Structure formats: C-alpha cells, structure tokens
Image (tube, grey):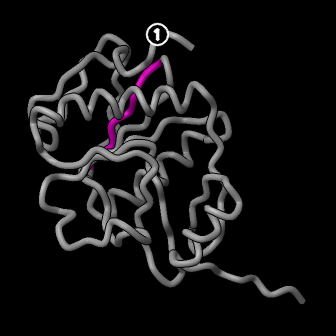
Amino acid sequence: MATKVLLRAEDLEGLQHRVGRRLELIKGELHEVTVTIRHTATAMHMGHLFQTWNDTARAGSVLGDAGFTLERSPDTVRAPDVCFIRKGRLSGVNTRRGYPEMAPDLVVEVRSPNDTWADLRRKAEQFIERGTQLVVIVEPDKHIELIRPGQPPHRLQLDDVFEAADIMPGFSCRVRDFFPEEL
C-alpha cells in the first residue's frame, strides 16, 4: 500500500529550484503551473501598467509569481501571476525566504490553456477567503472577470474601463490595454 506524502510550504521553495518549473502546493500536493508566451506577456504587461502607476502613487508593492501560504496542515501555497500589496502590509514579513502567510490585496490570474474557468474561480475564492479584496481573472485578448468578497463575479469586455479605486486609487485603463499588441 502506497503512502501519500503531503508536502509543507517549507518544502516547496527547495523543490522549485531543483526542478526548474513553476509549482504550487494545494493541500500538500504539488501542482505544476504551465504558461504560454501569451500568458507570460499578458501578465508582464499588466504588471508593468500597475508598476508604472505605483511608481507615482507609491501605494505599495507590485509583484509577479510571488508565493503566499494560504493554508496550513495541509499547506497551500499559491503564486498569482501579478499581485498588489498595500504599503505597510509587508513590514515585519520575511520577504527573503519562504512564502508569507498572507494574501495580497489584489490578485491577477491569467488563464493558461490548461486552466479551466472553474479552477481559476476556485483559486480566486482561496485568495478571497484569506483576505484578498479583488481577484482579476484574465482571458487574454477577450475579457476580464472581477471577483470581490460577497459579490457575484463581474465581467468587463475589451472596451470597458478597469478601476479599483479602493485598492489602487488613481489607476484606470481600458481592458484592451492589458493585452500587448504583439504576440
């Protein structure tokens, strides 16, 4: 009889470096994260737009692919494609090693070909349950879906304007501006 071994958040960091792939830990089990060039380009482009705003606003930290421990025993570590954490929330948090036990204020998840919409919504709910105020699920070149605590998902089309004044005051752009023109 085989015994299932559940990993801890502390085990994940070393594994990622050894295997050279993006991994997440869901209830102690490893899950590989696959991405395409379009996925990566979209995430980087969105991160760049957020960072450009933040360079002026100085409202917090914009991060990409940073892991966060969302559950313990068994552990869940999720790494959003892009996230924003308000100023002051990272003080006292070890940002050099491991995965902090916290959730970002805003999370962006770009859909990859192997992601189902239901999987992305479940991931969004994990972040919301841990305190994230807004999860943006992105269908590249088509639309985004906004998920907030206690509200039904809200879809924005390419010509709609994305704003999150309660989290990123002053940031605003059309949804189509999230997608790089090339690629």
Residue under the image location 34 percent in, 16 percent down: 177
Up-down: is 164 above or below 142? below
Identify residue type, mark 1. Answer: Glu
The answer to whether 58 appears left or right of 93 in the picture is left
Q: Principal SS element in the magenta part?
A: strand
Residue under the image location 43 percent in, 19 percent down: 179
Residue under the image location 31 percent in, 10 percent down: 159
Q: Can residue 175 be seen in this view?
A: yes
Q: Name the residue under label 1.
A: 181
Up-down: is 106 above or below 51? below
- Position of residue 53 measured from the top left corner of the image (x, y, whole percent): 18, 30
Residue sitting nearer the eye, 35 or 76: 35
Up-down: is 104 above or below 82? below
- Position of residue 20 measured from the top left corner of the image (x, y, whole percent): 67, 55
Q: Is residue 181 magenta?
A: no
Up-down: is 76 above or below 49? below
Q: Can residue 70 be seen in this view?
A: no
Disc 1 element: loop
Q: In which quarter of the image is residue 72?
A: bottom left
Residue under the image location 62 percent in, 62 percent down: 17
Give the quarter of the figure containing the C terminus. Answer: top right
Residue sitting nearer the eye, 49 or 3: 49
- Position of residue 167 measured from the top left corner of the image (x, y, whole percent): 15, 43
Point out the stretch of residues depicted in magenta.
142-148
Residue sitting nearer the eye, 21 or 156: 21
Give the quarter of the figure containing the N terminus. Answer: bottom right
